[in-house]
Amino acid sequence: MIPVFLSFLYCLISSPLWAVDATRTSGIPVSPTLPGQQAFQFLDIAEHVSLDSFEGSIQGYELQCEQGQNGKIGFCGGDCNSTDVSNQRGATLSKDCATFIDFAMPQCLLDIGCEREAAFCGVGGHAKRSIRSPSSPGSGTPSRHSTGDALDLFGLKCKDINGADMSFDFSAEGRRSNSINQQKYDQFVACWRAQVIKYHQQNGNKGGGAISCQGSAPPTNEFHNDHVHIACPVKRNNVAEI
């Protein structure tokens, strides 16, 4: 069996830091207790927060921003072009969504060759607002962001198996302008959607997925031409499906 989590000190440099255990990809994610009692394997929590939603208060987390010495995945809310992340905050999301991301994200990083030191940038998380869609403007349907069950990802940086730096632009222009970036963009989105489908097959509930830029595999729309929207398969009332 592939080890679930390799050394925090990168002693085994040739192996991915977030190697995926076969039982994780086939089993149902179990909601963890609060970090300190049983921490997430691949996410790091900066703070416990209460998220205001149209459904009331929801337990959530502020994620670690930059990828740290412990090797966990970073989710920075700041500018992707900034080299100074000292004043940037991590994205906020619900406990249930964090559980799913901890379960599903490692596979999607491995699919695009990210072996370690992964940090997403420009990340948008919880926001009490309605959906933005050209097909239903002003619908008033609460977005999955409103319950902390979605993230907007503008970019990603990481290292490959040889320790070389890699970066990905999750915009339509970034996807079009570079064939490798386009391939990795499409692989990442396809992996996330596949992970959500797998979860649905095991649990029977709906919701979650991804909305990407125009020109990629649907669902897409012009409002997502500068980022990828990923949503978790968390059961909610009166919110958008994705």
Image (cartoon, rainbow, N blue to C red):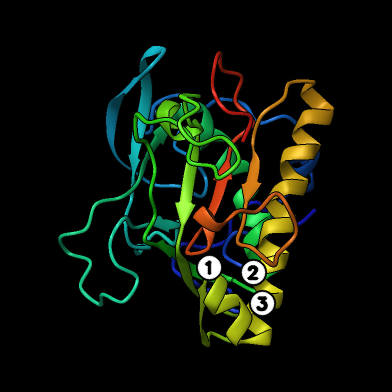
Q: Is residue 19 visible?
A: no
Between the C-alphas of marks 3 and 1, the distance is 9 Å
The residue furthest left is 87
The disc labelled 1 sits on which kind of residue? Phe
Q: Work out whether mark 3 precedes mark 1 in sequence or the reverse, and give the earlier one.
A: 1
The secondary element bearing badge 2 is classed as: helix
Q: Is residue 20 above or below residue 85?
A: above
User: What residue appears at the point 65 percent right and 53 percent down from the top-left corner?
Assistant: 220
Callouts 2 and 3 close, C-beta under 8 Å = yes
User: What residue appears at the point 56 percent right and 71 percent down from the top-left corner?
Assistant: 172
Q: Specify whether 231 is left or right of 124.
A: right
Residue named by callout 3: 182
Between the C-alphas of marks 1 and 2, the distance is 7 Å
Residue nearest the viewer, comparing 165 with 169: 169
The secondary element bearing badge 1 is classed as: loop
Q: Residues within 10 Å of mark 3 (few under 14, many from 20)?
A: many
Name the quarter where the C terminus is drawn: top right
User: What residue appears at the point 52 percent right and 45 percent down from the top-left corner?
Assistant: 41
Residue nearest the viewer, comparing 167 with 21: 167
The secondary element bearing badge 3 is classed as: helix
Q: Work out whether mark 1 precedes mark 2 in sequence or the reverse, and give the earlier one.
A: 1
Residue named by callout 1: 170
Residue named by callout 2: 185
Between the C-alphas of marks 2 and 3, the distance is 5 Å
Residue 223 point in image, percent of width and height: 50, 54
User: What residue appears at the point 33 percent right and 50 percent down from the top-left corner?
Assistant: 64
Q: Residues within 10 Å of mark 1 (few under 14, many from 20)?
A: many
Callouts 1 and 2 close, C-beta under 8 Å = yes
Q: Specify whether 173 is left or right of 241.
A: left
Residue 125 point in image, percent of width and height: 39, 42
Callouts 3 and 1 close, C-beta under 8 Å = no
